[in-house]
């Protein structure tokens, strides 16, 4: 069982906020679970990034030649679909937490 699956099976919502792992409800984490996250942080982030590549998002941040663009696509697109259009982009990332 993967490090990410282990946390989700324990009943936690695990997501990525930029490069930080976000776990809810964090108040329910035991010391053993906190240690597991610290020990397997890179693996969990990698699994979340892979998962994100397959998801469709409407809001994207694209950096191309130093210019930052925040775009909305309708219908939502996957990373590979955005990368196909912005082949020369320096950075492409979904915006998963919108300011409300």
Image: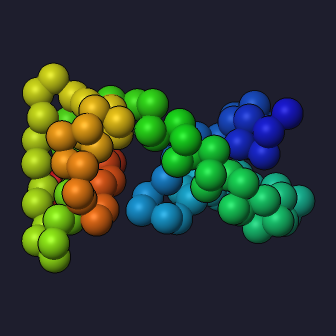
Query: Residue drawn 63% across and 44% down?
Result: 47
Residue 72: x and y in percent read 11, 41
- In the shown orientation, is residue 85 left or right of residue 14? left
Residue 77: x and y in percent read 25, 30
Up/down of 86 relative to 74, above or below: below
Q: Nearer the viewer, residue 58 or 62?
A: 62
- In the shown orientation, is residue 79 left or right of residue 13? left
- In the shown orientation, is residue 94 left or right of residue 25? left
Find the residue positioned furthest to the right. 32
Q: Nearer the viewer, residue 38 or 28?
A: 38
Up/down of 95 relative to 35, above or below: above
Up/down of 51 relative to 63, above or below: above
Query: Residue drawn 69% across and 62% down?
Result: 42
Query: Looking at the rendering, in which quadrant would you find the N terminus?
Result: top right
Residue 14 occupies which quadrant of the picture?
top right
Query: Residue drawn 71% across and 43% down?
Result: 4
Query: Residue drawn 78% across and 59% down?
Result: 40
Query: Looking at the rendering, in which quadrant would you find the C terminus?
Result: bottom left
Residue 71: x and y in percent read 11, 48
């Amino acid at each position: 069982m993967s490090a990410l699956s282990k946390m989700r099976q324990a009943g936690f919502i695990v997501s990525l906020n930029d490069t930080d792992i976000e776990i809810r409800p964090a108040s329910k984490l035991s010391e053993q679970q906190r240690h597991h996250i610290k020990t397997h942080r890179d693996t969990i982030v990698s699994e979340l990034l892979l998962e994100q590549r397959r998801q469709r998002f409407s809001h994207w941040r694209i950096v191309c030649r130093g210019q930052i663009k925040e775009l909305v696509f309708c219908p939502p697109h996957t990373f590979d679909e955005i990368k196909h259009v912005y082949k020369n982009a320096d950075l492409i990332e979904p915006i998963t937490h919108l300011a409300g």
